[in-house]
Image: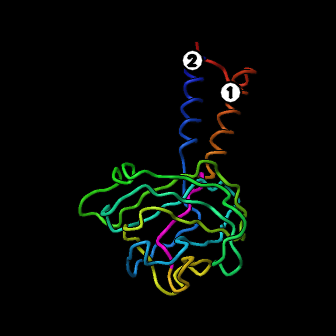
Amino acid sequence: MKWRTIFLFGFLSASAAFAQETDVRQILINGNAPASALGSPFGQSFVPTVFNQLTGVVLATVDNTGVADIHVALWRSDASGSVLLGSPITSGTITAAEINSFYTPAATPLYFPIYFDQSYSQTPGERLAFTIEGGVTLNFYYAVGSSYSNGRILGDASKDLLFATIVPEPGIITLLLIGVLFLFLLRFNKIPATR
């Protein structure tokens, strides 16, 4: 019984570690353009809605034509969402080969996640932005107007990128606590063990 319990706890912990969801997302599409045509610096500002660890962003392109390594940096931004403040908080990179692994011919958009090297403890209401370097010939999807009212493409106030921010699923903490409680009760014989 002991090994089965340890295995179950390990399996639940590993499953919980990989659970993720999105916090902020803009999913409307009105057009696409290469990064070089969408302003400089190229990126998107946004406002988090939950207390959580921001672990990365999801971007969307038309396909993998002109694919290259992409580096994303997370910044604080001003209230307008157009000016980057200070220095990057954290950053992450996805290689061209990793982007290609998400590509399926005849399926568009091409979504791919970029994970930060270190997560960031975001606070609801704070102003953040991410910048994108590399992949300048990839055609990124965007929406025009105020599709996402709490942010904008950094170099073009009339557009918003198709994007999502990645945070851990809140249920993982509950799952972990249930596993710990189960082990605690088993340890002190509150749950009879079968032999």
Write the residue at 71% across / 76% down.
78
x, y percent for residue 84: 66, 71
Amino acid carrying label 1: it is: Leu
Q: Which residue is mark 2?
A: 3
Q: Where does the magenta region start and end?
A: 160-168
Above/below status of 7 relative to 104: above
x, y percent for residue 101: 34, 50
x, y percent for residue 100: 33, 53
Write the residue at 64% across / 51% down.
119
Magenta span has 192? no
Residue at the right extreme of this rendering: 188
Tag 1–tag 2 contact (CB < 8 Å): no
Q: Which residue is mark 1?
A: 183
Near-viewer residue (189 or 176): 176
SS state under label 2: helix
Q: CA distance from mark 1 to mark 2?
A: 12 Å
